[in-house]
Structure formats: C-alpha cells, structure tokens
Image: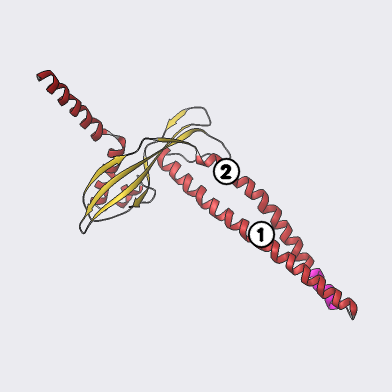
Amino acid sequence: MKKIFLFALSTIFVFLIFSCGSPEKSILGRYFEAVRFNDKMTMSTMAYEPISMELKKWRMVSLSQEEKKELPLNELFKKQDEIKETRDAIVNQVADANDKVAEAKANLSKARGAAKRKAEKELEEAENVYKETRASYEKIQKDWNELKALIDKEKALFNLSVGIEWPEGVELEGDMGVKEVMVEVTTATDVRNYKVILRRYTIKTPEGQPLNGRWIIEKFILQ
C-alpha cells in the first residue's frame, strides 16, 4: 500500500512539473502577467494580436495535440507569382480596351450618315469590352490585395517566432506547429472563455542550419 501511495504521489508530482513547465502554460503565464500590468510592449513580443483586460486570474482548461503544417509562406509566394502574371496580363488588356474606346470615339466624331450609326455601335461594343476587362482587373486586384495582407501577416508571425525576416525570393524547408489552448479568464466584471491559437516555426536557414522558433500567440478567439 505504501509503494502504491508513493508511486501515485510521484506520478502526481511529475504531472505537476510537466503542467507548470509546459511551453504553452509558460507563454500564457508570462502574457497574462504582462496583461496585469498593462505592459503592452511585452504583450506585443508574444502575441500577434494582443488583447488587454482587467485581469484577476486565469486557468488553462484544455490543450490540443500539436498539428504540423507546411510553411505557409512557401505556397503563398507561389500563389502571388501566379496572380501577378494574371494581373499583368489583364492590365495590358485594360490598356488595349481603353485605346480602342478612344479610337472608336475619334471615329465617331468624324463619321457622318450611315457611317455614324456604325461608329456608334463600334463605340458601344468597345465600351462594353472595356467595362468587362476593367471588372476583371478590379477582381484580380482585390485578390492581390487580400493575398498581400495575408503574406504580410505570415511574415510578421514568422518573424515573431523565429526572430529573423523571411529571406526574399527563397523557399525554406521546415514546418509550422499549431496548438489550440482553451483558457478561462476572470476579469473585474465577468468570466470569459478564449480559444488561443499558438504557433511555432521550425526551419532550416538558406545555409542549411536548423533554427527552432518559439511558441507565440497568433490570436485569442472569444468563445
């Protein structure tokens, strides 16, 4: 009975050490400590989207298994190259369509009689083509802006975890680890539950050296 008790006690002790020393609890503990003192500078070094509150206490409710994913920026840069090629082609089409509208207007100003009716039809057709190509350009430009914003975010998250800028024009080897932590936060006015998304990057530098990033907080999602 004594051996069973000692074994159970040692198991609990190991569990407590693991729980207190886990990287997830460590970063959240340091983050919420910064929240207590409204230390926004420290908060920004750990979280991409810091949140503030009048914190009284917090506790970690659950932790997911780590999910390994490919480095997002490798695929995002490839997609950016594809969109750029399409966008450049559409820009040329818009310019050509605009020139044809100007040409059709010039022809209409000189046309008389039956030729004028034909010129009016040609101008209408040219303007319709311009509107269509212009709409295509506006759509691809919207996609481009959204993708650029996503790339900027991924660059910032990468830098926050690894501590270096992603080298331009280089495809890196490695992966991204993602975990979800459920936390209960007691504030001065209420109790809130958050899903906290954590990230960590593990890469090889262009020189082939392994580089392990630290866990960072991507965002808090109020449940």
Q: Residue furthest top?
A: 3
- Residue 113: where, in percent of width, then height? 90, 81
Task: Specify the color scheme.
Answer: secondary structure
Kindly state the secondary structure of the residue where label 1 is placed: helix
**108 magenta-colored:** yes
- Residue 126: where, in percent of width, then height? 77, 67
Residue drawn at 25 percent across, 31 percent down = 18
Q: Which residues are magenta?
A: 102-111
Q: Quadrant of residue 119?
A: bottom right
- Tell me the kind of residue under disc 1: Ser
Q: Which residue is mark 1?
A: 136
Alpha carbon separation for disc pair 1 and 2: 22 Å
Mark 1, Cα crowd under 10 Å, few <14 / some 14-19 / many 20+, is some
Q: Which residue is mark 2?
A: 77
- Residue 174: where, in percent of width, then height? 49, 32
Side (left or right) of 147 relative to 19: right
152 shown above or below 162: below
Closer to the camera in the image, 158 or 1: 1
Kindly state the secondary structure of the residue where label 2 is placed: helix
77 shown above or below 204: below
Residue drawn at 34 percent across, 47 percent down = 195
Q: Quadrant of residue 138?
A: bottom right
Side (left or right) of 19 relative to 95: left
Residue drawn at 76 percent across, 61 percent down = 96
